[in-house]
Amino acid sequence: MFRPEEMVKLDVITLNRYKDELLTYLHEAGLVEIRELDVKLAQRDAPNEYHRKAASYSITISRLVDFLRAHKKTSGGGLKEFFFPKEKPKRTYRYEGLEKLIKDVEDFLARVEPEIKAVEGKLSSLQTEIEKIKEAISTLELLSVFRLPVEYLRHSGLVEVNVGSVERVKLSALLDDLKKITEGRVAIVSKDAGDRALLVIANLSKDHDKVNSVLAKHSFERIEVPEGEGTPGELVGEYRRKLDAKLRELDDARKEAEKLAEKYYDDVVFYQELMENERDKANVLPKLARTNMTFALTGWLPRVDVPKVLKGIKKVTKGKAYINVREPSKEELEEIPIKLKNPRWARPFEMLTEMYGVPRYDEIDPTPIIAFTYSFFFGFMLTDFMYGLIVGIVAALLVKGHKKFDDGTYKFAYTLLISSFFTMLMGILFGSYFGNAADIVLQYITGNPNAHAWRIIDPLREPLPVLLAALGIGLAHLFVGYSIGFYLKWKNGDRKGAVFEQLPWVLIILSIAFFVTKNPSLVLGAKALFGVGIVLFAIGEIISNGGLAALMIISDFFGFVGTWLSYARLMALALATSGIAMVVNVLAAMVWGIKISVVPLGIVIGLIIFIGGQLFSTAINALGAFVHSLRLQYVEFFGTFYSGDGKPFNPFKAKREVSKLELKADGGA
């Protein structure tokens, strides 16, 4: 706790014949972050033909997955599936080398791909034909205004026919140009179609070039006349019958696709995952070095996992491997990947730390601290027992349903669940139950207009004590941050930074705390602490900024004051929550007594306003509490000591949702 996992450097040299099996073991174990080797006496490794095939088959299978997923019948879903998702069953694949896996995939594709492609091609062809028929129907309906047989609308020997449309404002000029260019040897039929005009233009074929130049000049848009005989209205019926037939064929083809999805989807997804993991393994090869007989890799792993990894490497290589595990040097501190290490209760809050950035190897992991402060600030801002209860119920259901996945939803819900307890506690202390709803109910039951739920203070009536409490909490929060900053700088050898950057604020905050007590015996000590703090602060500014020190002293001091005052948002959001809840209650009360005859319509409307308004208030205020609580951690608190510049631990790890490999290193035969 407070420190990331201890990391060690791993170097391995072994024979080339163990490469695939060793990389597969490390990939499945997911405990080592492989780094690029800096070598001069050996060459970089590279993917071979089987790795390239794996990448190619991964793309091929992904297309099959997309097709089958589009036609797979879905089941489940809804709220139950959201809260309690089902685990995907995993199939075991006995791994006997990449060459064998590629052969199995090729056999699978040879059996399945033609069948899927045939149905996919049929669907594509039918959809293309259907679109053409629909386009023909649309064209015929447009041409039906002419009431001419469609055969008259096509070219016929010496006569050329153009069917299309033009902007109505250009119609007159087009007609004049056509008659002029053809010397009157043209027949034109036109019909209005909104802001455009439909035209049938018949001219001699020998005038083709002249007519085309005029049509292009006036932006004439041609319409392709569908095949068939008879009037457009008569042909529409024939095309509709064709459309119905093709739609029935399409429906049958979709049923075929659904059967294929039911039959092959799980298998295709299984092999897709196998291939994608092989492609991921191939991506690490350029980081390795090799000779004709051997290859080498290097990387980082947590010290706690060293025995397991060494055992696996020795088993895979049959002991024929050089293995070196060493402590990181000072020069490598910035390169060490960071894996957070916290007790179970704080682990989900690592998500909040990682959103900002993981600590450097020589920094403190703030996760255990923000596990408390984030939850407490959230509760202080939301500060309503019933809102906390609603958030807690939703979060508890999500925690229960997603715990087995340990995914982002579980971690986020866990943070909300802990925060909901603080929300309910603050709601009790401030006497807030859907705002002042509890007071209204008590006054109605007892008949006492002054009756109210127990509370230590009403923030809406007495905001000043709440503001002072918020500022006191902020001061304590900043004190912890500056104290940690002082410790880290001193420990890491930056004594000047510790004394002139961190210590002044520690002393100033202590002096403020002593002044607030108003204890005469502490006043002298408070003045001394404040004076020493200001002097150290001023010296630090002079050392850092030279001639600009005078300006920076004022700027940085008031920057600290602004940071401290930022904690007033604890009070502001608490008041906002109570205020919005009270407004909802007032609106519900305004319509509560409305009746139409003997029907108590106001009660129904009032309940809708109350329930809907309070749920909306819960959601919007919980969002505000989440954002502003995070801000107090990231901006105010982390700004006192934390950089978050570490490199997250990114292990060489397989992604397994539907597959599982059986390896020799795991006990396979």
Image: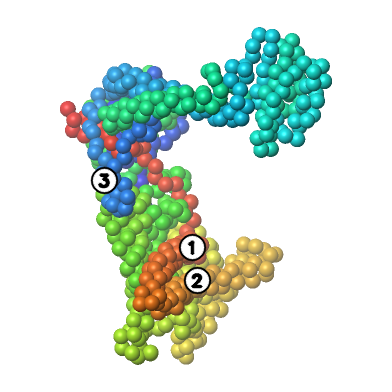
Residue at horizontal 37%, vertical 71%? 604
- In the displayed structure, would residue 597 be above or below residue 496? below
Q: Nearer the viewer, mark 1 or mark 3?
A: 3
Q: Measuring from the top left, give residue 536's x and y in whole percent.
A: 56, 71
Q: Earlier in the sequence, mark 2 or mark 1?
A: 2
* Residue 631, label in figure: 1
Residue in view at x 77 percent, y 16 percent: 185
Badge 3 element: loop
**Dividing the picture into quarters, in which one does residue 147 lie?**
top right
Kindly indicate the quadrant of the structure image that contains residue 392: bottom left
| In this view, 172 is above or below 514 | above
Identify the residue at the far top of this view.
Answer: 157
Depth check, mark 2 against mark 3: the one in front is: 3
Q: How far apart in space, not on screen, are marks 2 and 1 (Cα)?
A: 10 Å
Of residue 238 and residue 436, the one placed in the foreground of this image is 238
Q: Pick whichever of labels 1 and 3 is earlier in the sequence.
A: 3
Label drawn at residue 86? 3
Crowd around label 3: few <14 · some 14–19 · many ≥20 (10 Å): some
In whole angstroms, how far apart are the C-alphas of marks 2 and 3?
Answer: 41 Å
Specify how the rendered protein is coloured: rainbow
Indicate the secondary structure of the residue bearing disc 1: helix
Type of amino acid at the residue the image marks with label 1: Arg
The residue under label 2 is: 569
Q: Amino acid at mark 2?
A: Arg
Instruction: Estimate the x, y position of residue 362 in percent, counting from the top left.
Output: 43, 54
